[in-house]
């Protein structure tokens, strides 16, 4: 149910064309962060990470339209990104996977099992932090050895990362076989 509210809220933000409503949405986002005890600094860091995308969108809109419209789109993007950040803080990987499973229920008509999709999404989303951690560990190991990160060395790092990923996938597969999940 939360995902429906989130989708409607994010869609509503893009339909706003007045500054007063945008201010109300901004205040709603702030109120949600305060109620959910989400750190403002973490939300700002998240927006800063997305700034290159937002700036590219502003530049394209300046070229295609005018700067006022470009700024309006940028503000809307920032608000939607903030709402997405709030949503990501209040949901778990399994809740997101269940939501995608519900959205994929019509695929049963095509003989696609939504439970399999749920499992794949759950595993995929759970692997992202693992991959991020392993990449940073390899990066630190390279810098400890005095290796500089460039195109030549990325081949070595990515090879080791892929080997690590394959080991993790193998562990997950063995675990699923032991638990008797499907015909693997």
Image (spheres, helix red, strand yellow):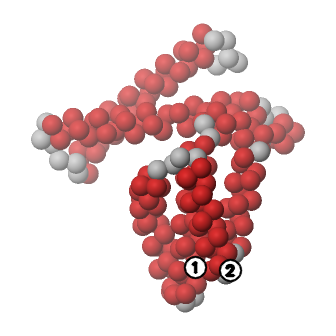
Could you say which disc has been placed on residue 17 in the image? Answer: 2
Residue 61 appears anywhere in the view: no
- Quadrant of image for the N terminus: top right
Q: Residue at x 60, y 17 (%)?
A: 176
Could you say which disc has been placed on residue 19 in the image? Answer: none
Q: Residue at x 23, y 38 (%)?
A: 140
Considering the numbered disc 1 on the image, is that residue within a helix, a strand or a loop?
A: helix
**Residue 92: x percent and y percent?**
60, 37
Q: Foreground residue, 44 or 66?
A: 44
Q: Using the rendered view, name the quadrant where residue 112 is placed.
A: top right
- Residue under circle 1? 72
Reply above or below: 150 against 94: below
Q: Residue at x 56, y 15 (%)?
A: 175
Residue 138 horizontal side relative to residue 35, left or right: left
Q: CA distance from mark 2 to mark 1?
A: 8 Å
Reply above or below: 119 against 26: above
Residue 182 horizontal side relative to residue 126, left or right: right
Considering every residue shown, the one lying at the far left of the view is: 146
Q: Using the rendered view, name the quadrant where residue 142 is placed.
A: top left
Q: Using the rendered view, name the quadrant where residue 7 is placed.
A: bottom right
Q: Residue at x 64, y 19 (%)?
A: 184
Tell me which numbered mark, 2 or 1, is placed earlier along the sequence: 2
**Residue 98: x percent and y percent?**
71, 36
Reply above or below: 12 against 123: below
The answer to whether the residue labelled 2 contacts the one labelled 1, judged by CB atoms less than 8 Å apart, is: yes
**Residue 31: x percent and y percent?**
60, 58
């Amino acid at each position: 149910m939360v995902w429906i509210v989130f989708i409607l809220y994010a869609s509503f933000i893009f339909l706003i064309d007045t500054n007063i409503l945008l201010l109300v949405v901004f205040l709603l986002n702030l109120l949600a962060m305060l109620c959910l005890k989400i750190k403002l600094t973490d939300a700002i860091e998240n927006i800063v990470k997305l700034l290159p995308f937002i700036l590219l969108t502003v530049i394209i809109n300046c070229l295609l339209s005018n700067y006022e419209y470009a700024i309006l789109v940028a503000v809307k993007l920032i608000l939607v990104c903030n709402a997405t950040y709030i949503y990501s803080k209040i949901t778990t990987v399994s809740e997101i996977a269940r939501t995608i499973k519900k959205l994929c229920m019509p695929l049963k008509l095509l003989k696609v099992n939504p439970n399999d999709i749920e499992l794949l999404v759950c595993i995929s989303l759970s692997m992202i932090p693992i991959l991020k951690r392993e990449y940073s560990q390899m990066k630190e190991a390279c810098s400890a050895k005095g290796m500089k990160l460039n195109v030549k060395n990325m081949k070595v790092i990515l090879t080791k990362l892929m080997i690590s990923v394959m080991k993790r996938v193998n562990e997950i597969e063995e675990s699923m076989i032991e638990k008797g999940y499907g015909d693997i």
